[in-house]
Image: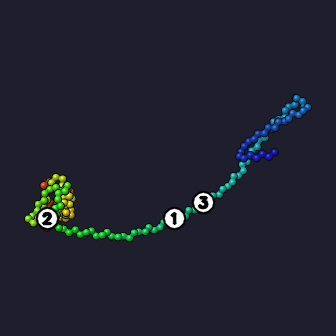
Amino acid sequence: MALRLRGTATLTVLLLGAVGVGVSACTAPAPVQTVIVTATPEPAETVVVTATPTPTPVAEAPVEAPVVPNAPAPVVVEGPANDTGAIPGAQGAASADGNGYLLTYTVVSGDSFFDIAQRFDVPQQQLLRMNPSIPNLGETLYIGQIINLDWQTTR
């Protein structure tokens, strides 16, 4: 008898002696025989996996854009102030000479140096050069302060 098992298993087979006909009833029963069957596993199918190496990416040299210089800044030509009218941040009164050229501006509450320069169409740098006595590059103004608007003089 061939027995094939997968995995490990224990099988117990009991063989009992048969009591024959005509045997006296006093006979001892045949001893019980125990058979242990241990199945050995079959080797599993071996799968060989070979890794295909991934090629190392080659870094391309970055393409640099040509450097193009900025266009030169426009030349600011100093000139007389031109009153464009009161705006928020420049509400004070301006004084002019007999020919209509602006001479001074009087600072009022809420004025800023930038807005004064905007109102009179004068670059801030020019207004600062015309008024070297203004502290903190125009950051500090005082109510009643006189700002020079005559581009040919300094105060």
Label 3: how many residues lie within 10 Å, few (<14), some (14-19) or many (20+)? few
Of labels 2 and 1, earlier in sequence is: 1
Of labels 2 and 3, earlier in sequence is: 3
Q: Amino acid at mark 2?
A: Asp
Q: Amino acid at mark 1?
A: Pro
Whether residue 77 sits left or right of residue 24 in the image: it is: left
Judging by the rendered image, the residue that carries numbered circle 1 is 57
Viewer can see residue 140: no
**Quadrant where the N terminus is found in the figure:** top right
Q: Residue at x 90, y 32 (%)?
A: 21
Residue with the most extreme top position: 26
| Residue mark closest to the camera, 2 vs 3 | 2
Quadrant of the rendered image containing residue 136? bottom left
Q: Nearer the viewer, residue 79 or 143?
A: 79
Whether residue 148 sits left or right of residue 41 in the image: it is: left
Judging by the rendered image, the residue that carries numbered circle 3 is 51
Q: Residue at x 59, y 61 (%)?
A: 52
The alpha-carbon separation of the residues under discs 1 and 3 comes to 18 Å
Q: Secondary structure at mark 2?
A: loop
Viewer can see residue 94: yes
Relative image position of residue 5 (x, y in whole percent): 74, 46
Relative image position of residue 73 (x, y in whole percent): 27, 68
Label 2: how many residues lie within 10 Å, few (<14), some (14-19) or many (20+)? many
Q: Nearer the viewer, residue 101 or 110?
A: 101
Relative image position of residue 106 (x, y in whole percent): 13, 57
**Quadrant where the C terminus is found in the figure:** bottom left
Of the numbered discs in the image, which one, if any, rests on residue 150?
Answer: 2
| Residue mark closest to the camera, 2 vs 1 | 2
Specify how the rendered protein is coloured.
rainbow
Q: Residue at x 82, y 36 (%)?
A: 16
Q: Secondary structure at mark 1?
A: loop
Label 1: how many residues lie within 10 Å, few (<14), some (14-19) or many (20+)? few
